[in-house]
């Protein structure tokens, strides 16, 4: 199980030498890496009808979403910052594409998703 937050004690470590001291500060909390909670297939869309679905993660704080292989169905876009797939599909069919979600450290998860657009 991956925790939502990895807690560490806040600490400042100093090493004193004969001439000077060097100190390093360590953060109190470290964010866990985002992991997809949304599973495939995504909810079905329909040609000509507005569509919206939000991709979700467990753990971590996502900062960027991207389609990394293939493309979304025609007429749909992925929100770069919010993980929302939205728009009005213009063609019927089933499409599989891969999305990557990352955090501020460029760590994250990559998953394939399938979306069917009905006529």
Image: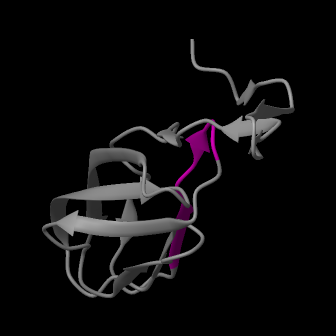
Quadrant for the C terminus in the image: bottom left
Segment tinted magenta in the rendering: 51-60
* Dominant secondary structure, magenta: strand
Image location of residue 60, percent across then percent down: 63, 43
Query: Viewed as shown, does residue 61 lie left or right of 53?
Result: right
Q: Residue at x 44, y 52 (%)?
A: 43
Q: Residue at x 24, y 75 (%)?
A: 73
Among the 4 quarters of the image, the one containing residue 96: bottom left
Residue sitting nearer the eye, 22 or 26? 22
Image location of residue 89, percent across then percent down: 34, 82
Among the 4 quarters of the image, the one containing residue 12: top right
Q: Is residue 76 above or below residue 118?
A: below
Among the 4 quarters of the image, the one containing residue 100: bottom left
Query: Viewed as shown, does residue 72 lie left or right of 1?
Result: left
Q: Is residue 101 above or below residue 72?
A: above
Q: Residue at x 22, y 65 (%)?
A: 68
Residue sitting nearer the eye, 42 or 69? 69
Please check the rendered image and state whether residue 101 is part of the magenta-colored stretch, yes or no: no
């Amino acid at each position: 199980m991956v925790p939502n937050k990895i807690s560490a004690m806040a600490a400042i470590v100093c090493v004193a030498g004969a001439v000077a001291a060097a100190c390093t500060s360590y953060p109190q909390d470290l964010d866990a890496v985002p992991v997809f909670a949304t599973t495939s297939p995504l909810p079905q869309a329909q040609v000509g009808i507005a569509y919206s679905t939000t991709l979700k993660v467990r753990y971590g704080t996502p900062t960027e979403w991207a389609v990394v292989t293939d493309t979304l169905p025609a007429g749909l876009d992925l929100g770069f910052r919010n993980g929302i797939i939205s728009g009005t599909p213009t063609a019927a069919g089933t499409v599989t594409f891969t999305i990557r979600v990352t955090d501020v450290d460029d760590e994250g998860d990559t998953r394939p998703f399938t979306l069917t657009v009905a006529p």
